[in-house]
Image (tube, helix red, strand yellow):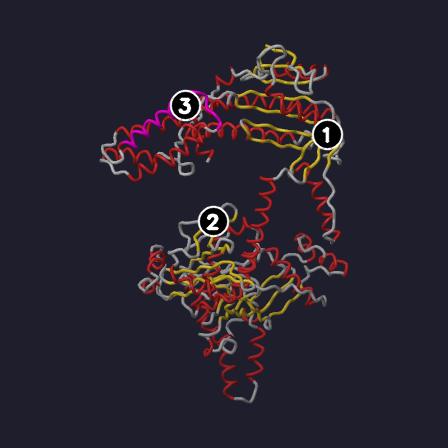
Amino acid sequence: MTPNFFKESPFKTLISFHKLIESLEEIAITNVDYRANYAKALLKEIEPFPEFITGIENLDLIHENETLIQYLLADLFPTALTNNEIKAVTIPFQNFTFNYTERFKKIVNEAGVLFDMAIRDFDEHQFYVMSCTLILNEFYGQKIDFNKPLFYDIPNKKGIMNQYRILYNADFLEIITTDKAPKLSQDDIDMLMDNYDDLALWKEKFPVESWILKGFGIAILFDATTESSISKLKSNLLKPEREQIALQENFESIFRSIFKIADLRVGVIVYNAEEDKFVKPTLNDTSLTSFILSTEEEVPCKNALLGCSFENLLENNKAISVSNVEKFAHEPGNQIFGSHLLNQNIHSCIFAPIIKNGMLLGVVELVSASPRELNSINASKLDLILPYLIDTVERYNTDMQNQIEAIIQREYTAIHPSVYWKFRKEAQKYFQTQTRDYIFKEIVFKEVYPLYGQIDIKGSSNHRNETVKEDLKNQLNALIQIFDNQKTKTNLVLLEQRKFELQSLLKQLDSPLKADTEQQIQLYIENEIHPILRNTKTDPAGETLEKNYFESLDEKSGMFYHSRKKFDNAMSIINKKLASILDKKQAEAQNIYPHYYERFKTDGVEHNLYIGSSIAPSKAFDTMYLHNLRLWQLQTLCEMELEHHQLKYSLPYELDVTSLILVFSSPISIRFRMDEKRFDVDGTYNARYEVVKKRIDKANIKGTKERITEKEKITIVYSHNNEETEYLNYIKFLQFKNVLEPTVEQFEVEELQGVSGLRAIRVKVSNKNSDETQKSFSYQDLLDELN
């Protein structure tokens, strides 16, 4: 171990034994012969070394005279205590020691030659300021308490890190001023007190080597591994989740230090009382280690894996200690769990319940690969740790519940961040009244401008009906094939009757599908056909057909679900892709001006936007923001159209989409419906907007049977001339950017019930550039992404 002094110090350090030698000189003139003679002999031995008094600067002198120094310090380092005390001569706060006791030598030797015995978390800044405070206290009468626990972290031969608390004896040190040391005023001292971080200031008031530190100190160490480890454990458990995960290895090393077991591993599981399950906790998308749940994420407490092993823990809240897992595994009822542990190279273990107010919160798992390392005796050490684990697991459960509530609010309610402030304000009023009779005010936003848009999958109902018919036909044909291959004479007449009925049902499917056709066929097959198949014996070929048939059935519906599944997957992929574009672009659009946003996935994606000063009262509103948002909406629908154009060729069904924008320039009010937990338009006049929204996508061009929407085109429905002018300008701009094609159609919309005078613009989205940079979508990759 190489001495390593801090580079700069307010002290010039002189290692000297002058105070000890003065004490020997006093003993030499006493009347106690044996003490006097010993002192005289020792003084004579050190006489050739005046540096022992004046101060040693060349450290080689210490190493060359180790034995003599050992004799000189014999009264301070008694031989009888050398194997018990951890003690050495040192210069306080410096990484420099000598004249070790035997126990100290053993600790240093076990640590290895590469070990650097530096004080934990102690840097040059702290060293310099701490040295200066010694001078302030000694010479300027200050009472600065800069003492903090100092520790050495020293590994033993097993690699376990032990922590040793350092105490200094400074009886044999003195501080001497020099001409370099400036005189300090009280103002100087006050300035230093307020500027701990200003190291340059401290060096100005206490220049390097402007004082002399003469003598030696004694470092006395005691093993504080358990106390220090528990303190570090507390600190780790209080850290944020992300840092806890990062410090997982450090977490285990703390437990190893407490239990003195080099291969100790730690796991934890949480108890879910609602479902009577053990669950592997997850922090920051990372599951914590568990040896009970080594492969599963959760397991019921009555699971056969645990057997009778956990009865004591669950019923009596008592820890399970197994000192020899191999022996434990041979006991009745423990075979499965014992083998489970042995497969993980666990030969001794402790499973301790984490309990708060008599309720089980979880289990902490300690395991070792060595038999008898963990046992019921050292399990008592967990009493020191469990209080902190209880608080942590309880906090984990609370945080998890809060996060679940947040997810529910985010995913299942209509409280968008832009309007959340108003709900929060009302909830805060309720909280502050301290009464349960508080009547909640309705949440209303007045004078907001609506924007509505949709991208709809064209002919989705017809496509869905065709896939239903296809699945039904395939199932009926499969059943007819089975009946054709029946070789048995059992119920022969009944089989012929059922085959005829199946063929009749198959013929019905050539006609348009009725609302109850699917249900009728399903009930018929379940009640009339499946019982026959299950109760009629047949030859091997027939058995194979029947086996393949039943394996083809969907678990939930009991019917063929092949074509429909492909169609449903195609619909879900389209919806997910388009919704993800809309959500991503919407987050950016909030920067234009905060506004309310909601979207719905149906047979396509619909969205509502509401913008106005009542939604963001702290920000001035101008219609410029509305126009910005309208252009953004049109551009976003173009992007969604292009994404679908590139996507549709990768899907098993080539589904087309149509896009629609409804322009409404009159401000309206929206109200949060408490019964429906969603926003809706408020008032009779505003209801006209909702009527148009619901009916417009099925409308035709006036005087024709042609729908106003068409595939790969965006239809913009409006009422006023200024709206027409505004959107024609947007279209010219997007045509200039080659996003829209040159041809623009304009027409009147047929009269809807209670609504007339609507007009529309229709323009095709250009996909030429899109075809040149065609994205490569794999259907399987899209399915994996969906699931």
Q: CA distance from mark 1 to mark 2?
A: 46 Å
Q: Which residue is mark 2?
A: 287
Q: Is residue 72 visible?
A: no
Q: Residue 439: x, y in percent?
A: 74, 46
> Is residue 331 found left or right of 163 in the rendered image?
left
Q: Nearer the viewer, residue 190 or 69?
A: 190
* Label located before the other in sequence (3 or 1): 1
Q: Amino acid at mark 3?
A: Leu
* Residue that appears at 22% across and 32% down: 487
Q: Which mark is nearer the camera, 3 or 2?
A: 3
Q: Are marks 1 and 2 in contact (CB under 8 Å)?
A: no
Camera-nearest residue between 751 and 499: 499
Q: Which residue is mark 3?
A: 509
Residue 52, placed above or below residue 574 = below
> Tag 3's secondary structure?
loop
Question: What amino acid type should be assigned to the residue bearing mark 2?
Answer: Ser
Q: Main secondary structure of the magenta part?
A: helix
